[in-house]
Amino acid sequence: MAERRMFTLKIVDSDAFLDMPMSAQALYFHLNMRADDDGFVNNPKKISRMIGASDDDLKILLAKRFVLGFESGVIVIKHWRMHNLLRKDRYNPTQYQEEFARLQLKDNGSYTELATTWQPLGNQMATQVSIGKVSIGKSKVNDDLSILKRLTGEEQTVLEDLCEGFDNFMQLIRYTDAKISRREDDEPISDPYSYLLAVGINDGFIREQ
């Protein structure tokens, strides 16, 4: 693993980043410093404890999609390739190839999860991917799947602002997950952002402008 890492101001100078608590920002920098050459970290909880960050700080980074998480406990820095450019002769591929295979690289250099039967904005792929026993193509939600995973970072930021804060936004996510799990049909939700917005307005999490 390299001893030097770089950061781009496009990410760490953004409002979305600077609006986070300082402890979450510090955790982000420490995770970046300890990531492998593809941006993967296998011990984010240990690093959190080591620097005195809380579990909530890691949850904030995951919710705001500055890092992406896997069931194995491994995380990856979403904007890793925007931060770092390594010479080929110094590059060592990650050992977390199973997790790496579930990512694709966007045009701007950031990671995103492989597209599934639901169609993310601006993405033309439609690969069927299963997580645990649940297919993302289904609208049902359990512990393995949340509608939060189907939002872009920009959509999350907008909804968080409309909910007047991160805590209220996460309450909306939990409420909507439970609401979806009670649905009698398995018709996929084609536009998760619009669905969340409608639930937020109709059920009082978001005040109409």
Image (cartoon, grey):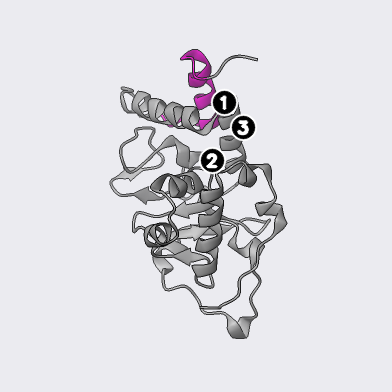
Q: x, y percentage for residue 72?
A: 34, 59
Q: Earlier in the sequence, mark 2 or mark 3?
A: 2
Q: Quadrant of residue 175?
A: top left
Asked whether 200 falls inside the magenta stretch, the response is yes
87 to 48, vertically: above or below: below
Task: State the residue position of label 1.
Answer: 164
Q: Residues within 10 Å of mark 3 (few under 14, many from 20)?
A: some
Residue at the left extreme, as displayed: 133
Regarding residue 15, the answer to whether it shows in the image is: yes
Instruction: Tell me the kind of residue under disc 2.
Output: Gln
Regarding residue 122, the answer to whether it shows in the image is: no
Q: Secondary structure at mark 1?
A: loop
Which residue: 66% across, 53% down?
A: 11
Task: State the residue position of label 2.
Answer: 119
Which residue: 54% across, 19% down?
A: 206
Which residue: 44% across, 52% down?
A: 53
Instruction: Tell me the kind of residue under disc 1.
Output: Glu
Q: x, y percentage for residue 24?
A: 52, 49
Task: State the residue position of label 3.
Answer: 158
Mark 2 or 1, closer to the camera: 1
| Numbered range of the magenta stretch | 187-205
Instruction: Tell me the kind of residue under disc 3.
Output: Val
Q: Quadrant of residue 9?
A: bottom right
Q: Earlier in the sequence, mark 2 or mark 1?
A: 2
